[in-house]
Amino acid sequence: MATVLIDGTEIEIGDGERLNAIEAAARAGVSIPYYCWHPGLSVVGSCRMCLVEAGTRDAAGRIQMGPKLVPACNTLVRDGTVLVTQSEKVQQARAMVEEGLLLRHPIDCPICDKAGECLLQDYYFEYGQADGRRADIRPFTSRRRDLGDVALFVDRCILCTRCVRFVREVSGTNELLVSGRATGEEIDVFPGFPLANKLSGNVVDLCPVGALADKDFLYRQRVWFMRSHPGVCTRCASGCSIWIDENQDRIHRIRPRENPHVNRWWICNDGRYDYPHVHNPARLVGARQRKGGDTRELDFTGLAGQLRAALRQAGRLGAVLSPFLTLQEAYLLAGTIRQLDPQALLALGPVPLAGEDERYPGGFTISKEKCPNRFGVERILGRMAGGVIRFDHFVEQVAQGAIAGAWVSGGYRQGWIDEATAAKFEQLRLLVVQDLFPSPLSQRATYELGGAAFAERDGSYVNRQHRLQSVAWAIRPPAGVRTEGSILWELAGRAGLYDAAATLRELAAEIPFFHPALGTIPETGLDLLVNQIA
Amino acid sequence: MKSDDKSIKWVEEPPLGLAGRSYVPLLVGGITTTLKHLAGPKMTVESPEQRHAIVDPLGYRGVHRLNRDAQGRVKCVACFLCATACPAHCIDIVAAESPWPDREKYPESFTIDELRCIFCGMCEEACPVDAIELTSLYDLSGKSREEMIFDKAKLLSVYDQTKDAEPMRSAQADRATDSACPDSGERGEEPI
């Protein structure tokens, strides 16, 4: 056990831990400012913002401070390390670093997307505020350079090189470099080799100032108007933790949420730019009933009762549980259909696959399975239907006339089912489809219901590493859409509003595999397999 | 605050004397005021044919305008600071990349709901480029709610209407400092 003295506070550090002074100070509740250091990247110690006084304390308790300030990011703490982070010397050094950085930094904060979450702004207020010694007027504009996936505002850059280290160490694609020397140093790419990789969006989050700009988010919204909601990406089975930044029920940006067990600090561009479909005007909204050639718009009042009665009269039932459903929704749907017809056929919806798993040198993996909850839905099916029936088999059964009424849950992007497959559903007496977009299948449905997108749902997902993550809705669904959870809750004949937490507890009590979920679910999720063994 | 709070000072209304109870002095006082105004100069103006003289048009907070730069383009850079400062949430801006090479960002649409506006002038104070200003036009009216939601074109037209009578405040400030500090070589305050 190592004892470290930080600003007079003693903290204990475990034997196997290798902490630098920034991390150790954070444990003591002391924040040390930094630009270039990032826990997920190598240490360069180039910004000099984290300079602190460091020394050692010997066994007799005598403290010997070093003669010079040292960068905290590059100083590993060990037993007897003494750090002073608030002395006049340190504060002076920080103010000087701020003055140096701001010497050539354009004052275009009013049009800079980073304003409001910019470290340069924050640290200037906290540690800088020195009277400027520059006599002329500072530039108000910044040169813009196209780097490929992102745009670079050259003059705003403080050359922390986080982006350069990211493309070398995490994505392994090496597009970015520092060109020039001394005051001529700039971030650049080689001609003909633009920044183009599936993790490129992360360099925008990494940039501590507004130098790197997301072309998708550029000038779309000021950051202080948005609220961030913790969420889980549903683009693939990795289930990365994300922040959903939203203003007035419109998603403007998706950012990675730090989760050491899943995605660490990163997300891929597929997930980052996966929100426009949520606001696609082509989305399926409302509820309608088709009888013969007639289409009738339905009110949600009493709809659950009507659906229940129709399902009861239909005869032999079947249900398709989409891998986009949350655990709660799958559990409610399976339970209700089984209750109405104990012999009902429950099947797993088609699992969208694309290529192979993509692995990056930094450990980040994009799964080939492009749905969030195949594993969880399979476990529910395994318990409630005795096994996992594939969608092909379900379609066969429908074609053979073994099923009279079916509930198909969607949540897919457009084009998940073709005309030929959908035509086989025509002979059903009753077909209920709840989906995100109109499809050949939803056009044949007796009851067509609009479904919720990922950011509108309450519930839990189990990713490919058996990690269960619970999320709450970030935005409200568009007018005329009721979420799967609330419709299925009513269909199950339950009173009140859909309660995802209570449903999770219920299914955890019923299905042994989900027993660990009876306790509280941490923000970073819960490993079902590990907790099972324990 | 409760009624037995120590910090409350209770004041009794003074009892009326004979003069007060008879109302005669008050009546005389009132009639005197009326008679004085009958004889004195007229305060009422026949609006809208006649206009009130606005003592300081630059300090007056009437209808907004969006200023133009030297090339006639909208001066606004779509920074949203006015919308952020606005206590009535009546400013709605849609920002976009500007079509001009020398400017980065501009407002694709800029609307002010003049019905919602409380004419506090905070937008004007927040603006870092002196693009939004309040003019001395006070008699704005419209036949519908939609008509009172001023868009970018309308706000720019207010500028065209008022620019001669009320020059841009930034231009005036420049002139004022120029005349106040004849030694222009002296370094002023650091611009931020």
Image (cartoon, coloured by chain):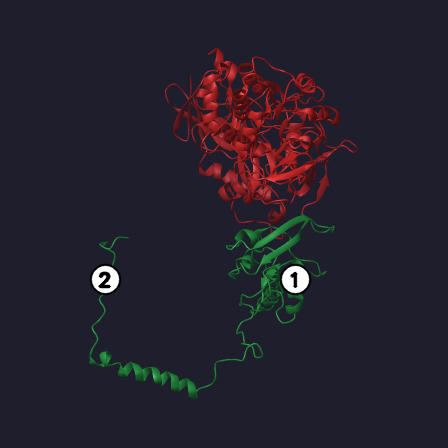
Which of the 4 image quadrants contains residue A351? top right
Q: Which mark is residue A298?
A: none
Using the rendered image of the protein, determine whether residue A91 is visible from the camera's viewpoint.
Answer: yes
User: From the viewer's perspective, is A58 left or right of B66?
Assistant: left
Residue B154 disc label = 1
Name the foreground residue: A253 vs A107. Answer: A253
**Residue occupying the point 62% across, 24% down:** A406
Q: Residues within 10 Å of mark 2 (few under 14, many from 20)?
A: few
Lower sequence index among marks 2 and 1: 2
Identify which residue, A345 or A98, lies in the foreground.
A345
**Chain A's colour?**
red
The local secondary structure at tag 1 comes to helix
Disc 2 to disc 1, C-alpha distance: 55 Å
Mark carried by residue B10: 2
Image-based side of A83 in relation to B30, left or right: right
* Amino acid type, label 1: Lys
Amino acid type of the residue tagged 2 in the rendering = Trp
Q: How many marks?
A: 2
Instruction: In the rendered view, tell whether residue A520 sits above or below residue B140.
Output: above
In the image, which lettered chain appears green?
Answer: B
Residue lying at the far top in this picture: please name it: A533
